């Protein structure tokens, strides 16, 4: 099925090929990237492969935000607290140097062992987490730092206190702030991109997904419970709503796929970090030449164009 | 990670829910009414004041001055980008919703005036697939913002939604940032947004444009929650407070500005619109 997106990629590919005479290294890099993405689209994953992505995205050894921070950033300083109520450990923020520039980084953080998992609330943020993230976004905007967001959240925490503290409003306001930022922003889904909890920190100029990450409007189990009335039908639900990176790229929801080492990011975290770093660098370089106004305008135009209707 | 929402276990020792009441029977005091009786009472129970859900057309009639409503983008229809099939195909569910409600989608938008104040209206209808937000709802809301900005008038949104429309997969999630960006563009154009959250305003709609109103008002007893009480209970086993997620609790915790009974809604919004117009007249 030749979708619009595939045609668009083909068209860009054809145009770039004709420009070969001008081609420096950047251009050939672009060509390769497009060819790679086209190859991926043409080999649309089967239902089994989609479920494999779901499992890999949730793999207990999968690298989390701080694993990448450790490998990609120098002089990392983690910041804490939302300056109002709490310091939500499910979401980390901080400043660090990435390839020579200061960046602001926000990321969801799950825990490795049961003690840390409990401390980090299994990566499920409270409204306090989003307010903490917004604090970082304001620092980035004020000082002209690019913002990198690593997304890996099963979903925003569905608890009594979370509701009382304004979960819905916090997610809405975090997105609104991201749409106002005048600095380059790159988001990458590195595991589970779970619904509102994920989009809260993913309204970025470039949105990437790791090869085995998933991006969903509801967990496969939640969807199965509602539509099939049986949470055990999660596999069927995942196959139906196609949360894998290839389908997200095809639908225009993400701008690129970040390759992972053979077998998944957990098999070789160093290599996974290197590949992620390359993609982040590439995206930031592209964005850093744009004016603050252009960034904001294009970002909003991109998100406002998403959807399929007649 | 294991399932966060596991209803299969829950179902074992929970008694069958009581049979569904007739939609015109008041869930609070069991009074029963004919359609025309409820219509005349603005779908508020004359006995106990319970607010029944209100259809989009009735809501427009309640708020807009007679003959002032000019509908926009009425011909937009959903497509089925994922060829989604659960127990039934998405296209079938859409066709059925249109037959049942007489609406093309879960949102109606258009130009209107409220007590002489020109504005743009975006009104949701819960009867259309639970007021879920898919590509068309997102696009209609986005166009409503543009229409308001172009004409230099404020936007009044009335929400009633179960959240994002799962059948459109990740594209339905993308309607959150889409509508958020639309509100931001409206605000940049200097226009206000009044958000009226009616029962229920939950999940994706609460977590996007509905929460971005300059002023947010609700109706008595409306459920306004990112996660509804049933899922919170099942996931966390926490004991829920009596008024969990209701407008009353939201007001107490500072998430909304006011709870306005339906008969007072029109003059209340009109007063706000007058205040937001630059010269105050």
Image (cartoon, helix red, strand yellow):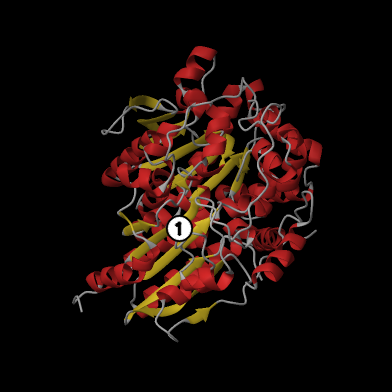
Q: Is residue A148 shown above or below A287?
A: above
Q: Is residue A27 shown above or below A200?
A: below
Give residue A232's position: percent from left, percent from top. Answer: 75, 32
Q: Residue at x 75, y 53 (%)?
A: B84
Horizontal arrangement in the rendering, residue B206 relative to residue A37 (left or right): left
Give residue B126's position: percent from left, percent from top. Answer: 57, 60
Q: Quadrant of the N terminus of chain B?
A: top right
Horizontal arrangement in the rendering, residue B160 relative to residue A146 (left or right): right
Residue lying furthest left? B279
Q: How many marks?
A: 1
Tag 1 residue: B198
Q: Residue at x 33, y 51 (%)?
A: B256
Label 1 crowd bin: few (<14), some (14–19), many (20+), radius 10 Å: many
> Between residues A159 and A198, which one lies in front from this camera angle?
A159
Q: Residue at x 78, y 43 (%)?
A: A45
Q: Is residue B75 shown above or below A114?
A: below
Q: Quadrant of the C terminus of chain B?
A: bottom left
């Amino acid at each position: 099925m030749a979708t619009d997106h595939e045609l668009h990629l083909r068209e860009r590919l054809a145009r770039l090929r004709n420009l070969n005479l001008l081609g420096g290294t950047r251009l050939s890099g672009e060509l390769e990237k497009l060819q790679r993405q086209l190859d991926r689209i043409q080999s649309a994953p089967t239902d089994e492969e989609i479920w494999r992505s779901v499992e890999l995205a949730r793999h207990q050894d999968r690298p989390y935000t701080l694993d990448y921070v450790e490998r990609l950033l120098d002089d990392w300083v983690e910041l804490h607290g939302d300056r109002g109520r709490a310091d939500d450990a499910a979401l980390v923020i901080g400043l660090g140097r990435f390839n020579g520039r200061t960046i602001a980084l926000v990321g969801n953080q799950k825990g490795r062992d049961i003690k840390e998992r409990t401390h980090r609330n299994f990566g499920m943020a409270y409204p306090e987490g989003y307010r903490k993230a917004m604090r970082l976004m304001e620092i980035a905007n004020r000082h002209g730092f690019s913002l990198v967001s690593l997304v890996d959240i099963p979903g925003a925490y569905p608890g009594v206190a979370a509701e009382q503290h304004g979960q819905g409003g916090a997610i809405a306001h975090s997105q609104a702030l991201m749409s106002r930022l005048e600095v380059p922003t790159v988001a990458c889904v590195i595991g589970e991109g779970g619904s509102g909890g994920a989009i809260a920190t993913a309204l970025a100029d470039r949105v990437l997904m790791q090869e085995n990450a998933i991006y969903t409007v509801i967990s496969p189990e939640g969807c199965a419970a509602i539509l099939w009335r049986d949470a055990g039908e999660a596999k069927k639900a995942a196959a139906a709503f196609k949360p894998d990176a290839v389908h997200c790229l095809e639908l225009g929801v993400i701008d690129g796929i970040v390759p992972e080492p053979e077998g998944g990011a957990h098999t070789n975290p160093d290599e996974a970090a290197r590949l992620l770093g390359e993609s982040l660098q590439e995206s930031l370089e592209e964005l850093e030449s744009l004016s603050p106004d252009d960034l904001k305008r294009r970002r909003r135009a991109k998100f406002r164009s998403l959807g399929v209707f007649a | 990670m294991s399932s966060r929402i596991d209803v299969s276990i829950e179902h074992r020792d929970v008694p069958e829910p009581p049979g569904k009441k007739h939609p015109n029977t008041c869930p609070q005091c069991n009074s029963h009414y004919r359609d025309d009786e409820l219509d005349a009472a603005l779908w508020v129970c004359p006995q106990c004041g319970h607010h029944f859900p209100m259809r989009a057309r009735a809501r427009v009639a309640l708020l807009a001055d007679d003959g002032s409503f000019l509908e926009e983008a009425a011909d937009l229809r959903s497509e089925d980008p994922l060829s989604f099939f659960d127990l039934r195909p998405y296209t079938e569910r859409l066709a059925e919703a249109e037959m049942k409600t007489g609406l093309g989608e879960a949102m109606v938008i258009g130009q209107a005036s409220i007590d002489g104040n020109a504005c743009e209206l975006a009104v949701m209808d819960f009867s259309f697939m639970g007021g879920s937000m898919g590509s068309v709802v997102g696009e209609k809301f986005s166009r409503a913002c543009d229409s308001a900005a172009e004409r230099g008038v404020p936007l009044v949104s009335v929400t009633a939604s179960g959240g994002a429309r799962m059948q459109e997969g990740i594209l339905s999630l993308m309607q959150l940032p889409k509508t958020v960006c639309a509100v931001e563009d409206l605000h940049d154009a200097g226009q206000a947004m009044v958000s009226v959250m009616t029962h229920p305003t939950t999940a994706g709609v609460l977590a996007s444009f509905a929460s971005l109103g300059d002023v947010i008002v609700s109706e008595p007893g409306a459920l306004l929650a990112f996660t509804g009480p049933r899922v919170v209970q099942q996931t966390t086993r926490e004991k829920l407070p009596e008024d969990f997620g209701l407008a009353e609790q939201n007001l107490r915790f500072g998430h909304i500005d006011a709870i306005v009974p339906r008969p007072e809604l029109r003059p209340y919004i009109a007063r706000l619109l007058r205040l937001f117009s630059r010269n105050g007249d």
